[in-house]
Image (tube, rainbow, N blue to C red):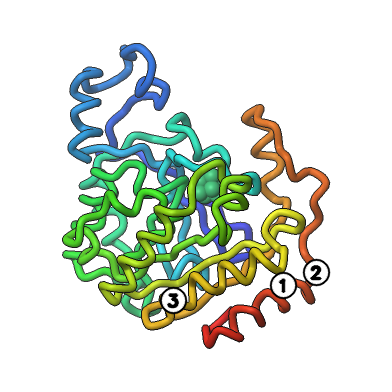
Amino acid sequence: MAQDGTTGIVTLEPQQGERVRGVAAGLGGTADADLEITRPELLEARRTGDVGLVHSWELVTAVDGPGTRMTIFLSGCPLRCVYCHNPDTMEMKEGTLESVESVAKRVTRYRSVFNASGGGLTLSGGEPLFQIAFTRRLLKLVHDAGIHTCIDTSGYLGARLSDEDLDNIDLVLLDVKSGDEATYNAVTKRELAPTIAFGDRLSKLGKPVWVRFVVVPGHTDSEENVNNVADIVARWSDNVERVEVLPFHNMGADKWKRIGLPYELEDVTPPTPESVEHVREVFRSRGLTVF
Ligand code: SF4
């Protein structure tokens, strides 16, 4: 466990315990002699959600949802956002194989902290819906234990969640990364339509949503793009409780270098406070609550 003393962020390393031992590379490579289960058993456990590849954990306050939250970062993401802060979670390469029961047990240990602060569990990544079987089971176990649950998602894989799964999710943090297909594709290398379809579905169900939009100078901050995103989100104004407009920062650059991927935003500087405020005003002009 490590605390940096300035942000209040506590990082909990995945610990020993009931986790399933093995190297993450074993998921896609040859069976490892160190594995306590055989490779076919491991693949079956991944299919059923008995185990998942957990990248890291944090206990955070006032980030990733209300109150004090355990944020669990799961490995794997279908998007390739040019500004990704966690590129080491894109591939199913880094992390620790953990059993769903042991992760749920570790989360429920913090129940009194969550209850006192109005917090709970947030599943992030990577993309938490990438390892859907593990995510589905973990959310049910934790939600059944009376803990508030949240997913931090791009919505790209939202169709993987059944309505029953959504009953185990109290809040969706939905990243709307751009407002038209061409810009969305340039920024994420994927399509926007699944995110809109997921947002429409959440709206129909009345599911609480916090929308997130990252202002990346020269990539997402054009007047047209911001207006397009605001128009999309305004359609969901009944269930969108807030919009968080976040300034791009360069803090993920070192991670891109470490994993040997080209980082396209080397020369991009963070947006000015005035330009971020301007984007917030565009959302406010649609009657939305903006932070
Ligand atoms: S969706 Fe999130 S984790 Fe995936 S590439 Fe984009 S920023 Fe990174």
Amino acid under label 1?
Val
Contact check, label 2 and label 1, Cβ < 8 Å:
yes
Query: In percent of the image, x 45 and y 48: which residue is there?
Result: 125
Rendered view: 232 above or below 18: below
Residue matched to label 1:
276
The residue singled out by tag 2 in the image is: 272
Q: In the rendered structure, which disc, 3 or 2, sits on the residue that comes first in sequence? A: 3
The kind of residue on which mark 3 rests is Arg
Vertical relation: 199 (above or below) 194:
below
Left or right of 241 on screen, residue 36: left
**Residue 119 shows which numbered tag?**
none
Q: CA distance from mark 1 to mark 3?
A: 22 Å
User: What's the residue at 77%, 72% (across, down)?
Assistant: 275
Q: Quadrant of the C terminus?
A: bottom right
3, 79: nearer the viewer? 79
Task: Determine the secondary structure under disc 2.
Answer: loop
Q: Secondary structure at mark 1?
A: helix
Q: Is residue 236 left or right of residue 285?
A: left
Q: Which residue is mark 3?
A: 235
Rendered view: 57 above or below 229: above
